[in-house]
Image (tube, coloured by chain):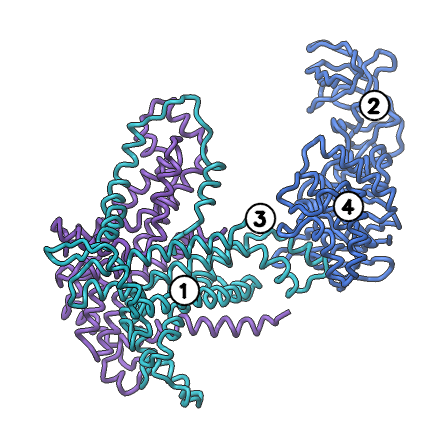
Chain colours: A blue, B purple, C cyan
C-alpha cells in the first residue's frame, strides 16, 4: 500500500487549448479507498490514466509514496488497473491471464502457481482456470480482471468504472465484494465511477470532479450534507436537491412569493436556496410555505411528491413516507428543515457559509 | 522502441519498390523508343504527348477499349442485379435448402478456372457464342457471381427485420420490398461490389484469351498482349499503350480509393 | 482476393445472423424461386454444368467431331506425365512460398503504419496500387525490369557495384520461378498490408494497455498480445494467398509462358497448352488434368482450413 499525491495535475491534449484535467490536487492516504466521481467527460478517467501512466502528464506532479513518478513508465509504477471492459487477453486461459503479469516480471513458476491458485480461490475462479475469456460470463470476466490486479500485489489499485458493464443485480453484489476486498487487503485504491451510489457506499472519501476540475473532496456523508457548490449539491442524492432562486433580505429569505424568516449577516443579495427532498416535510406545524401538488410518485418504500410553489420556476420535490396523503391539485403546507438547507451564490455557485 | 526514423526509411524504400515500376513506365510512355534506347532511366526531355493518340489510332486500341467497356459494363450490371436478388433471398427468407444452396454458390469461389474453362469453350462453340462479347459477358457473370453473392448476403442479413415487417404491413409485394427496401439500404455494399467487379473484370485475361480470338472482339488485356507482340522491341510505344490501360484504373482509384480498398479486402479481416 | 471462409463459418454465421422465423409459416415460394432463378440459371449453365462436362471429358478422348469413351486411360497417362507433375510441383511451391513472403512483409509494413509514422494515409494508398493492375500490365513491366541488358534489376545491381550478381532473371531455369514469385509478392503485399492494418486498428486498446501495465515492452506486446489477436486474419490471408497462387495463369503467360524449360510451368498454363496449343486437339486429356487439379485444390483448401480452424472464437 502507498500514498498517492496529485499536485496541480493537468492534461492538455495536443492540438487543443482546452484542459481535459485542470489543476487537480488530491492526496490519497495509505490504504484509503478514494472515489473519483463525476459525470461523463469530467476528466476523472483521464486523471486515473495519468496516475496509471497511460496518459502523459502535461502539468503538475504525481507522487507515489513520496517519490515523483511523472516520467516513470507505467510498468514500473507498481500499480495495477481494472479496466471497464476488463481487457482480458482473449487468447489466454484464465490461469494465464492471471499469471501473465507475474511471468513478465520473472517470478518463479512455482510462485506464480501458488499466487494464482490463491487468488482464484478467494474469487471463486478455481474451477474456471483453464477456460478462455469468451467462455466466461460478464461477472466471471470481471472477477478475472480483479484477480489479475490482486495477484500482482501492487502498491496501488486503480479501477476504471469496473462495474458499468454489469447488469444491475450483479453490480450490487460486486459492490459488496469490492468493499470486503478492500477491508481484507487494506490496499490503497482509487476508483472512478459516474454512479453516486457506488461512490457513497464504497469510498472512504469522494473526490467530485466537474469540467476537469475538482469540485469537492471529503467523506461521503460530509460531502452529501455540506456540498461546496450547486454542482455537488445537485449531483449527489436521488432525487436531486431542490435548487430555488431567491433573494436574501434583512431578516428573511424570499423564494418566489414565499417569505421565510432567516437571519444572516451581510447585505441583501440574490441567492440560490438548496434543500434536499428529505429535509422538507408536509406538515402544518412550523410550515414555511404552501404549495400545490403537481404529481405523486409512490415508490413503495416512500413517496415522492412534486409541488409548485408560487413564483418558483421549477418543481419542488419532497420525500414523504409511504403513507403520505396528497392528491394532485391540493394545496399542502410545507415545513423546511432550515438547519440542513444551504445558500449558494448564484454567480460563483459556491456555498455561502 | 524502434526509432521512427528507421521505420520511415523502411517505409520509403518499400514505396519506391511498389511505385517505382509505374513511375518508370510513365516516364517511358512520354519518350520515343530511340530516346529510351540511349538511356532507359532518364527523365523525359520533351514530353511526347503525341504518342498517346498515335498508340490509340495506329493500333486497334480504340476497338479493344470499346470491347472491354461493353463487356464489363454489361457483365457488372447484370451480375449486380442477379447477385443482389439471390443474396437478398438467401439473407431474408428461411427455407430448408437455404444454407445448402448458398454453400453451393459460395463454394465455387475456390474452383480453379481449369475445371470449367475447357467445357465453357465447348459450350460457347456449340451455341455460337464463341468469339462473341455476349458469350464472354455470360461467362464473366458466372465467374463473379459467387463473390458478389457472398459480399452482398452478409450485408443484406444485417438489415433489421423490422423494416421488412413494416413494408409487408404496408402492403408491399416481395419484389417491391427487394427493390424499395433492400437495395437502397444496401447501396454501400452494392457500390463496393460494383467497383470490385469492374476492376476484376477489366483486368481479366484467362477466360478472354480462351474464348476470344477474333481481333475485332479483343478486350483490352488481350489487346495489350497483342500490342506487345506486334510492337516487339518498340518499348516506347508499348509503354504508352500500357499507360492507356492503366489510366482508367488510376482515375477510378483516385476518386474511389477508400471504397476500392474496402471492396477488395471485404471478407478478409476476421 | 476472394473470400474463402470455411463452410463451418458460413453455417455458424447462418445461426446467428438470420432473421427469426416469422409468425407466418408459409414462405413466399414464388418470390423465392423468382429471386434465385436467374442466379442459378447462370450458375448451372456456366459453372455447374461445365464442371460436370469437364469430368465427362476426362474419361473420353474428345477430338473434333469424334468423342470416344476411354475409361481411365487419361488418368493413367496423367500419372506418368512428367510435365504434369513438374507443373504441379511448381504451382505448389509457388502457393506455399508466396503466402509466407506476402504476409510476413505485409505484417511488418502494417506495424510500421500502426506505429503512426507520418504520411501513413499516403503510404497505404500507394502500396495498394499494384493490386489494381492487370496481370498483363504487370507482366510486361516486369519483363522489362528483368531484362538482362537494361532492366532495372540489373541496372541497380550494376550501379551498386554488384554487377557480378546480375542475372538473366527469367531466362535462367534455376531462378525463373523465384523471380516470378517476387513479382506476385510485389503485387499482393500491399493488399495484405491493408487488411492487416485494419485488423490492427480493430484491436481493443485497453488490452494493449493492460499488457503495458503487465511489463510488456513493444516486442513483448507484439509477441504475446498483438500477433495472437490478429492471428485469425493472418491465417485467413495465408489461405487466400495460397488459393490465388494455385490458380495463377495470367502472369506466367505474359512473362515466361512456362519456360524456360518448364521451370515456371504451372498447372493452368499446362492445361491451356494441352487444350489449345499443342496440335493434339484432344480436349479429353486436359480435362483430366483439370479434374485432378480440382481435387488437389479442394483437398488443399480443406486441409488448410482444418489445420487453421479456430475452435474458440476470439471474442473481444
Residue A279, numbered label: 2
Q: Are marks 2 and 3 in contact (CB under 8 Å)?
A: no
In space, the residues marked 1 and 4 are separated at their CA atoms by 47 Å
Q: Are marks 1 and 3 in contact (CB under 8 Å)?
A: no
**Chain letter of disc 4 in the image:** A
Badge 1 marks a residue whose secondary structure is helix
Residue shown at 45%/66% (left/top)? C102
Looking at the image, residue C180 lies above or below residue A338: below
Badge 4 marks a residue whose secondary structure is helix
Whether residue C151 is visible: yes
Q: Earlier in the sequence, mark 4 or mark 2?
A: 4
Residue C95, numbered label: 1
**Chain letter of disc 1 in the image:** C
Whether residue A243 is visible: no
Mark 4 or 2: the one toward you: 4
Q: Earlier in the sequence, mark 1 or mark 3?
A: 1
Q: Is residue A97 left or right of residue B134?
A: right
Badge 2 marks a residue whose secondary structure is helix
How far across and down, in percent of the image, does residue B198 sit?
30, 54
Q: Are marks 1 and 4 on the same chain?
A: no
Q: Nearer the viewer, residue C42 or A150?
A: C42
Toward which corner of the image does residue C41 lie, by quadrant?
top left
Quarter of the image for the C terminus of chain A: give it.
top right
Residue C314, numbered label: 3
Q: Nearer the viewer, residue A224 or A182?
A: A182
Q: Are marks 1 and 3 on the same chain?
A: yes
**Chain letter of disc 2 in the image:** A
Q: Are marks 2 and 1 in contact (CB under 8 Å)?
A: no
How far across and down, in percent of the image, does residue C211 sit?
68, 57
Q: Are marks 4 and 2 in contact (CB under 8 Å)?
A: no
Amino acid at each position: 500500500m502507498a500514498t498517492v499525491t496529485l499536485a496541480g495535475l493537468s492534461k492538455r491534449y495536443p492540438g487543443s487549448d482546452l484542459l481535459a484535467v485542470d489543476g487537480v490536487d488530491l492526496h490519497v492516504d495509505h490504504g484509503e479507498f478514494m472515489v473519483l466521481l463525476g459525470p461523463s467527460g469530467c476528466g476523472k478517467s483521464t486523471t486515473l490514466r495519468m496516475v496509471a501512466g497511460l496518459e502523459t502528464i502535461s502539468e503538475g506532479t504525481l507522487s507515489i509514496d513520496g517519490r515523483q513518478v511523472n516520467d516513470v513508465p507505467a510498468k514500473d509504477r507498481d500499480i495495477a488497473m481494472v479496466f471497464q471492459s476488463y481487457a482480458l487477453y482473449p487468447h489466454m486461459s484464465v490461469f494465464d491471464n492471471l499469471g501473465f503479469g507475474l511471468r513478465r516480471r520473472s517470478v518463479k513458476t512455482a510462485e506464480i502457481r501458488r499466487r494464482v491458485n490463491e487468488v482464484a480461490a478467494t474469487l471463486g475462479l478455481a474451477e474456471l482456470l483453464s477456460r478462455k475469456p469468451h467462455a466466461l460470463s460478464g461477472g466471471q470476466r470481471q472477477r478475472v480482471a480483479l484477480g489479475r490486479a490482486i495477484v500482482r500485489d501492487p502498491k496501488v489499485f486503480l479501477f476504471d468504472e469496473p462495474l458499468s458493464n454489469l447488469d444491475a443485480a450483479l453490480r450490487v453484489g460486486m459492490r459488496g465484494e469490492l468493499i470486503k476486498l478492500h477491508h481484507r487487503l487494506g490496499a490503497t485504491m482509487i476508483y472512478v465511477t459516474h454512479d453516486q451510489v457506488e461512490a457513497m457506499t464504497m469510498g472512504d472519501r469522494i473526490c467530485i470532479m466537474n469540467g476537469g476540475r475538482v469540485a469537492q473532496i471529503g467523506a461521503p456523508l460530509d460531502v452529501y450534507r455540506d456540498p461546496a457548490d450547486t454542482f455537488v449539491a445537485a449531483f449527489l442524492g436521488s432525487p436531486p436537491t431542490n435548487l430555488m432562486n431567491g433573494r436574501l433580505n434583512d431578516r428573511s429569505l424570499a423564494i418566489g412569493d414565499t417569505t421565510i424568516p432567516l437571519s444572516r449577516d451581510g447585505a441583501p443579495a440574490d441567492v440560490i436556496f438548496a434543500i434536499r427532498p428529505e429535509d422538507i416535510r408536509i406538515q402544518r406545524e412550523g410550515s414555511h410555505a404552501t404549495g400545490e401538488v403537481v404529481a405523486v410518485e409512490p415508490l413503495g418504500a416512500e413517496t415522492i411528491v412534486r409541488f409548485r410553489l408560487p413564483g418558483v420556476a421549477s418543481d419542488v420535490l419532497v420525500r414523504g413516507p409511504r403513507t403520505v396523503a396528497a392528491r394532485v391539485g391540493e394545496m399542502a403546507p410545507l415545513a423546511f428543515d432550515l438547519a440542513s438547507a444551504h445558500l449558494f451564490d448564484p454567480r460563483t455557485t459556491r456555498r455561502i457559509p | 522502441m524502434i526509432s521512427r526514423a528507421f521505420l520511415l526509411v523502411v517505409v520509403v524504400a518499400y514505396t519506391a519498390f511498389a511505385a517505382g515500376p509505374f513511375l518508370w513506365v510513365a516516364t517511358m510512355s512520354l519518350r520515343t523508343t530511340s530516346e529510351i534506347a540511349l538511356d532507359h532511366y532518364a527523365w523525359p526531355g520533351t514530353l511526347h504527348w503525341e504518342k498517346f493518340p498515335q498508340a490509340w489510332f495506329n493500333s486497334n486500341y480504340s476497338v479493344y477499349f470499346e470491347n472491354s467497356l461493353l463487356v464489363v459494363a454489361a457483365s457488372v450490371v447484370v451480375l449486380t442485379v442477379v447477385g443482389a436478388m439471390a443474396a437478398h433471398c438467401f439473407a431474408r427468407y428461411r427455407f430448408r435448402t437455404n444454407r445448402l444452396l448458398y454453400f453451393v454458390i459460395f463454394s465455387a469461389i475456390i474452383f480453379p478456372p481449369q475445371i470449367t474453362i475447357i467445357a465453357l469453350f465447348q459450350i460457347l462453340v456449340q451455341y455460337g457464342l464463341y468469339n462473341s462479347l455476349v458469350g464472354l459477358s455470360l461467362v464473366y457473370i458466372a465467374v463473379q457471381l459467387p463473390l458478389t453473392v457472398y459480399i452482398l448476403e452478409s450485408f443484406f442479413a444485417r438489415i433489421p427485420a423490422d423494416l421488412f415487417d413494416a413494408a409487408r404491413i404496408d402492403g408491399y409485394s416481395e419484389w417491391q420490398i427487394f427493390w424499395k427496401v433492400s437495395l437502397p439500404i444496401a447501396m454501400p455494399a452494392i457500390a463496393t461490389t460494383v467497383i470490385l467487379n469492374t476492376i476484376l473484370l477489366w483486368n481479366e485475361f484467362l477466360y478472354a484469351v480462351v474464348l476470344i480470338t477474333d481481333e475485332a472482339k479483343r478486350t483490352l488485356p488481350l489487346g495489350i498482349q497483342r500490342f506487345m507482340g506486334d510492337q516487339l522491341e518498340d518499348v516506347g510505344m508499348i509503354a504508352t499503350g500500357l499507360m492507356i490501360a492503366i489510366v482508367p484504373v488510376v482515375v477510378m482509384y483516385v476518386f474511389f480509393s477508400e471504397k476500392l480498398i474496402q471492396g477488395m479486402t471485404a471478407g478478409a479481416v476476421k | 482476393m476472394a473470400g474463402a471462409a470455411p463452410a463451418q463459418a458460413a453455417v455458424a454465421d447462418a445461426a446467428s445472423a438470420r432473421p427469426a422465423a416469422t409468425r407466418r409459416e408459409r414462405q413466399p415460394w414464388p418470390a423465392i424461386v423468382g429471386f434465385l432463378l436467374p442466379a442459378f440459371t447462370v450458375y448451372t449453365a456456366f459453372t455447374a454444368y461445365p464442371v460436370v462436362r469437364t469430368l465427362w471429358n476426362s474419361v473420353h478422348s474428345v477430338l473434333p467431331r469424334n468423342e470416344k469413351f476411354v475409361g481411365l486411360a487419361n488418368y493413367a497417362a496423367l500419372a506418368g506425365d512428367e510435365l504434369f507433375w513438374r507443373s504441379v510441383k511448381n504451382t505448389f511451391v509457388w502457393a506455399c512460398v508466396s503466402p509466407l513472403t506476402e504476409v510476413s512483409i505485409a505484417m511488418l509494413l502494417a506495424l510500421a503504419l500502426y506505429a503512426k509514422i507520418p504520411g501513413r494515409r499516403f503510404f497505404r494508398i500507394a502500396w495498394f496500387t499494384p493490386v489494381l493492375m492487370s496481370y498483363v500490365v504487370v507482366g510486361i513491366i516486369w519483363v522489362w525490369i528483368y531484362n538482362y541488358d537494361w532492366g532495372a534489376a540489373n541496372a541497380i545491381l550494376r550501379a551498386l557495384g554488384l554487377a557480378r550478381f546480375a542475372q538473366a532473371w527469367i531466362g535462367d531455369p534455376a531462378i525463373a520461378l523465384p523471380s516470378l514469385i517476387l513479382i506476385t509478392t510485389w503485387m499482393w503485399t500491399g493488399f495484405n498490408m491493408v487488411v492487416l492494418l485494419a485488423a490492427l486498428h480493430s484491436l481493443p486498446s485497453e488490452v494493449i494497455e493492460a499488457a503495458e501495465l503487465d511489463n510488456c515492452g513493444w516486442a513483448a506486446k507484439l509477441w504475446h498480445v498483438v500477433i495472437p489477436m490478429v492471428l485469425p486474419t493472418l491465417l485467413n490471408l495465408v489461405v487466400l494467398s495460397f488459393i490465388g497462387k494455385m490458380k495463377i495463369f495470367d502472369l506466367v503467360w505474359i512473362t515466361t509462358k512456362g519456360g524456360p524449360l518448364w521451370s515456371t510451368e504451372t498447372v493452368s498454363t499446362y492445361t491451356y497448352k494441352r487444350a489449345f496449343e499443342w496440335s493434339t486437339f484432344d480436349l479429353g486429356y486436359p480435362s483430366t488434368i483439370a479434374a485432378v487439379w480440382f481435387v488437389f485444390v479442394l483437398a488443399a483448401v480443406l486441409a488448410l482450413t482444418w489445420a487453421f480452424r479456430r475452435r474458440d472464437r476470439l471474442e473481444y
